Image: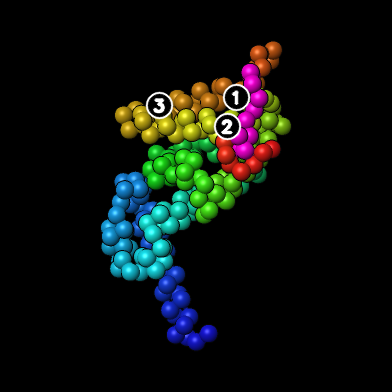
Amino acid sequence: MSVEDRELRADARRNRQRLLEAAQTLFRERGLEVGVAEIAEAAGVGRGTLFRNFASKEDLIEAVVAKRMYDAAAYGEQLLHAEDPGEALFDFMAQMVGRQQLDRALFEAIDETWLSKEVIRPAHAAVFGILEQLTTRAQAAGAIRDDVSAVDVMMMFKGACLAATTYGREEPGAIERYLDLIRASFRPVAGGPPLRGRSPTLGDLGGGRSD
């Protein structure tokens, strides 16, 4: 490869990174309705450059959301080595809820329509895989009850995210309140009644698995 070719490739990588960073910032602040012209302007490139990197706005959204999910999975992977497995699980949940408050685009992309996208699906699987491991470690340590699944945890987490989005601005303390309620509901209770029904799996939700 010639020096000129290397420089062109490096410039293309820089443009792509600038576009991702600009889109991430604007999506975080205003949601997915931001136009491509604004994103290109914020990145300091033309619309033609944007569409050479991303065939459509949807492709750009997918790339941003997938990156945020992989970042979350990387954070959770670090928590797998924490001394307190119970605290590690709730630390992960608290960090994810915090992301939802700041990252409106990520919250909007968690629905089933976006999760079916080819780029996002493996990123979501990575997050869920870490959540499964954190849940299993917390159960093995006796920090949470044995009759919950990682999908149970995920569904409770989504509820906390909704609370963060709905009430967070008016009452920031509401987020901690709902996280405390989730923590209390997962705490083992000696002699307490078992949960009714069976633990759901990701396959039940159309996530492509049937554990």
Tags 2 and 3 touching, CB below 8 Å? no
The mark total stands at: 3
Dot 2 or dot 1, earlier in sequence:
2
Q: Amino acid at mark 3?
A: Ala
Q: Pointer 2: what residue?
A: 153
Q: Foreground residue, 134 or 209?
A: 209
200 to the left or right of 62: right
Label 1 and label 3: CA atoms lie apart by: 19 Å
Q: Decide which of tag 1 and tag 3 comes sooner along the chain.
A: 3
Q: Secondary structure at mark 1?
A: helix
Q: Is residue 197 above or below residue 104?
A: above
Q: Which mark is residue 186?
A: 1
Q: What crowding class fits label 2: few (fewer than 14 Cα within 10 Å), some (14-19), or many (20 or more)?
A: some
Q: Which residue corresponds to mark 3?
A: 174
- Say which residue appears at 53% left-offset and 36% top-offset: 93
Give the secondary structure at mark 2.
helix
The range drawn in magenta is 195-204
**Classed neighbour count for the residue bearing mark 3: other residues with Cα under 10 Å, few (<14), some (14–19), many (≥20):** some
Q: Are marks 1 and 3 in contact (CB under 8 Å)?
A: no
Mark 1 neighbour density, 10 Å: few (under 14) some (14–19) many (20 or more): some
Q: What's under tag 2, amino acid-wise?
A: Val
- Which residue occupies 53% across, 25% down? 182
Where residue 11 sits in the image (x, y, percent)?
41, 74
Queried whether the magenta region covers residue 199, the answer comes back as: yes
**Residue contact between numbered discs 2 and 1, judged by CB atoms under 8 Å:** yes
Cα gap from disc 2 to disc 1, whole angstroms: 9 Å
User: In front: mark 2 or mark 1?
Assistant: 2
Q: Position of residue 48 (x, y in %)?
A: 33, 69
Q: Earlier in the sequence, mark 2 or mark 3?
A: 2
In the image, 210: left or right of 66?
right
Give, as a three-letter code, the residue at label 1.
Phe
Q: Quadrant of residue 133?
A: top right
